[in-house]
Amino acid sequence: MAVTRRTKKQDANETAALLQAYKRMLSIRIAQEELVKLYMEKKIFSMVHFYIGQEAVAVGVCDALKKGDKVMGNHRSHGHYLAKGGNFRRLVCELLGKANGSARGKGGSMHMVAKEVNFVGSTPLLGSVVPISAGVAFEQKYNKRGTITVAFYGDGASEEGVVYETYNLAALYKLPLLLVIENNLFSINSYIKNRRSGNYDVKKIVEGLGVRYEQADGNDYHDVHEKARALVDSIREESEPAVLECMTYRHMAHSTPLREESYRSEDTAEKRQESDSLKKIHDELLGAGISEKRLSALENTMRASVRKDITFAERSPYPKKSELYTNMYAT
Ligand SMILES: Cc1ncc(C[n+]2csc(CCOP(=O)(O)OP(=O)(O)O)c2C)c(N)n1
């Protein structure tokens, strides 16, 4: 039997790809950590839903997309915006209500948008991103663009009535749509088992409505990425929708940086720490021969760049009074 040996070049390419994924996930983690500081200093007035812990989902999925593919998000979408290539400086400006924010300082944390990279927008009304993204996918199919749409939403949002209706419609119209459920077990502080009957089965529901279903370990970049890539390829080829449910943990409270533990008996702090996707990929890089020294130098450089962007945002101007009523419904 012929034995296929891996070449040094293959190993080097794999390590380079791993490092790239790590950098993309780390950039979201650092951005969030620095935004937490800003929040604690009371410089961000609006609600902020931190994405710490879920980075492997945004990056794993977005790494499977082409630039022309479209992405939409929800109230917890800093990670989706950044993973699709949105500019961090514009994100901070947006959070601080500054004129050069991604939505001209009028949207805040829950209304991220970056048209230049096809991040179409995020809609905090739970579940609404699903029918809206179906409309975006419908346009892509109608005009034969060869691109697909991805929508991210939580397990709580997935229980909204309009989501089930959209599964049916997407299957009927064979839309090029990837629906990504980020199942972090909680809707605010309401535990999933207290919201669903014992017989509730997401796979059966989704498939019963005619949509393909896959589940991934949302704390593992590789699992998310491989499953997303296979679904994206098949959606592009067959123009048929799919749901990818990623099982993950949010590390912080629902909408503040606090780490409330009182209601979290399943996803304990210890479990979250152990299964942290960043930690896993960091350890893989060490195993592939990248030194701890190199990884911490990388982290320091990235953090310095994030801090520079935050300082820029803090020094940026607010919108002029004359702009109070402009661009209210579109950027
Ligand atoms: C229609 C609607 N109902 C209620 C809310 C208030 N709300 C905001 S976030 C949230 C929980 C969302 O949970 P999930 O969809 O699982 O996402 P996660 O916050 O866990 O990322 C709720 C109930 C809302 N934004 N929209």
Image (cartoon, rainbow, N blue to C red):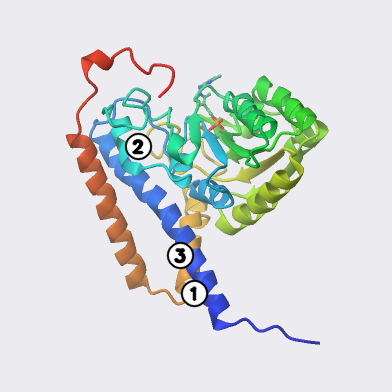
Q: Which residue is mark 3?
A: 19
The secondary element bearing badge 3 is classed as helix
Find residue 85 and report its horizontal and vertical position in percent: 44, 45
Q: Nearer the viewer, mark 1 or mark 2?
A: 2
Q: Which mark is residue 91?
A: 2
The reply to whether discs 1 and 2 touch (Cβ–Cβ < 8 Å) is no
Q: Which residue is mark 1?
A: 287
Give the residue at x 29% y 14%: 324
How crowded pointer 1 is (Cα within 10 Å; few <14, some 14-19, many 20+) is rated as few
The secondary element bearing badge 2 is classed as helix
Q: Amino acid at mark 3?
A: Leu
Find residue 166 and report its horizontal and vertical position in percent: 70, 25
Q: Amino acid at mark 2?
A: Leu
Task: Give the quadrant of residue 168.
Answer: top right
Q: Locate residue 158 relative to residue 8 in the image: left or right.
A: right
Task: Give the quadrant of residue 265.
Answer: top right
The reply to whether discs 2 and 3 touch (Cβ–Cβ < 8 Å) is no
